[in-house]
Image: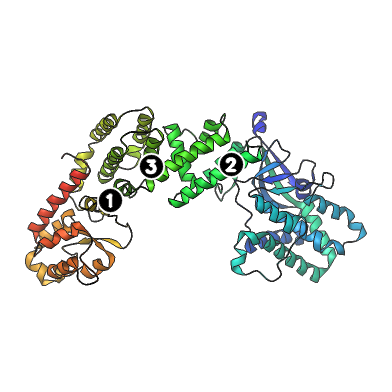
Amino acid sequence: MSEMLGIFKPDTKNVKSIFGEPTSYYQIPDYQRPYDWGDKEIQQMWDDICSAFEGQDDFYFLGPMVLVKTGNGYFEVVDGQQRLTTLTILFCVLRDFYFKHFKRKDEILKNQILDSVESMRMKKYRLRLITQAHYHNRFEQEILRKVTLPQKALTKRQKQKLKYKFMNGASILKNSLDELFDDFGIGKIRSLAQFILDKVLFITITCSDRVSAIKIFQIINTRGLELSLADLVKSSLLARLDDERKHMQFMASWRDIENIAENNDESVSDLLTYYAYYLLASKPKRSLYEEFEKLFRKKKANRVIYNFQKFAEHLDSILSSKSKVVYTLQHLPDKVFWKTILATAKMEGFQKFDQLCEELRRMYFSYWIADYTTAKTRNFSFRLVRLIKAGKTLSEIRKEIESKMDENDVVEWVQKYIKENVYWETWLKPLLIMIEYGQTDESVFIEYSRKLHVDHILPGEWGKKTYWKRRWTEEQAGFWLNKIGNVTLLSGRKNIRASNDEFPKKRKIYKGKGLDGTTGFEISKRILRHSHWTENEAKKRQRWMIKQIKKILDLRF
């Protein structure tokens, strides 16, 4: 038990103790999201407290508060920001609008409220918001120094904006207090204020380190962890910086990384995951945050952020390249490992990068088509990271991939599955795009969207048309309908118009005319060579499609 208390110390405290003890100073670290409580949350907290007060309850429990003891005289708030900030706003509203109604006998109560906002002995604010410098300044100017209320009622859109959150919170609490004052007078407000100070309780859990605090927060918070991996890593690194210039340099690098993430539809947490896998080159043994804490323990924060930014920039150069191979890799169901491996290659100065991209496409698509899950290649993906970091050549890596694929009989399974009914397979559209790229020059890119369809050449409702019934038996149609030899790519509008027509009409649509033009896909243009579509044509197209797949994925059946 004594060992556990060295990690964290739980305690029950009322609001008066939370805000009034000599050591009661709190900072909201800059990995936390800003204060964002709106009408619903503030009103709910007010109603709950008032209900307990009216019911003359012995106490009202406002929930747990998870803190980390720091060396700068403040407790870092891991959980409890919204409640602490709302209570501070309430005390400031009482101070600025209701103290004038208090009597001489209320001097102790007034001092307790004042001391909850700013220590009367130390002349220091109890709560600091350091999520952003301008954000704390807004809190100080609009709330702590003197409450600023909106000149007119805030609109619904304004209330959703962070810059109005403090002002909106003050307005809600002021209106609630006004209703109480109008109905019952200042005595009721005095009694409620005393109830809040004395009878509203928190369980504070004070931890010796942030890792322990985060673990506890995860366990007790049923909403799940609100802080992302990026939030936690950022906070850990910033905590080491006591120099303002270094802090500014760090934040400038962090913003650059955020821009890279946004430009590539990633999150910073995604980038950190890839980076962790690059550094570890093995399956993590604990949470990524804990892994980073261990990896960065003895490293300077700005050196860490420099290397991470370099990694992110390499990944950005890969994702923004005009490589069709990289573009098709992005259709894979799992993005983590190929991105990690390619960024690793850039970080390590791998010589034959384009050929490595082709090897990864070959391996991951083959496993996908062979109906293997990501788990099948997970450990091997880490092995590829290790091989690249060890300076292995492309031929050595290719040999490892060949051996792995042979071990799992991947080529045999690919050969089997591409000859079966493929129409419903998730890999079909990306595979058709790859075949299309094999027929076009480097400047052509295909937008992967809902408007891009896979079309049956022999349509699904072939039995409703005399044309098709003359040329296809039930058995033939049943066998070929969903084979790769009977499908092609079409844009959305053409697909709708072509869906169930007779082949001569579908052929005209494939060819197009006027503003429509001929369909832009070369694999669809090949169909125009045929006057009719029979089982023989489907067989020929099947052989051609499989030949293209073997060529693109470098497979030997």
Res 96 → quadrant: bottom right
Q: Which residue is mark 2?
A: 249
Which numbered disc, 2 or 1, marks the residue that appears first in the sequence?
A: 2
* Residue 493 rendering spot, x and y as whole percentages: 27, 68
- Label 3 – label 2 distance at C-alpha: 27 Å
Q: Closest to the observer: 511 or 192?
A: 511
**Residue at 12% over, 57% down:** 538
* Colour basis: rainbow
Where, quadrant-wise, is the C terminus in this rendering? top left
Q: Amino acid at mark 3?
A: Lys
Q: Please say whether residue 278 is visible from this viewpoint.
A: yes
Name the residue located 42 percent from the left edge and 41 percent from the top edge.
Answer: 314
Q: Is residue 128 above or below residue 360?
A: below
Q: Quadrant of the N terminus?
A: top right
Residue 235: image tag: none
Number of numbered discs on residues: 3
Reading the image, the residue beneath label 1 is: 427
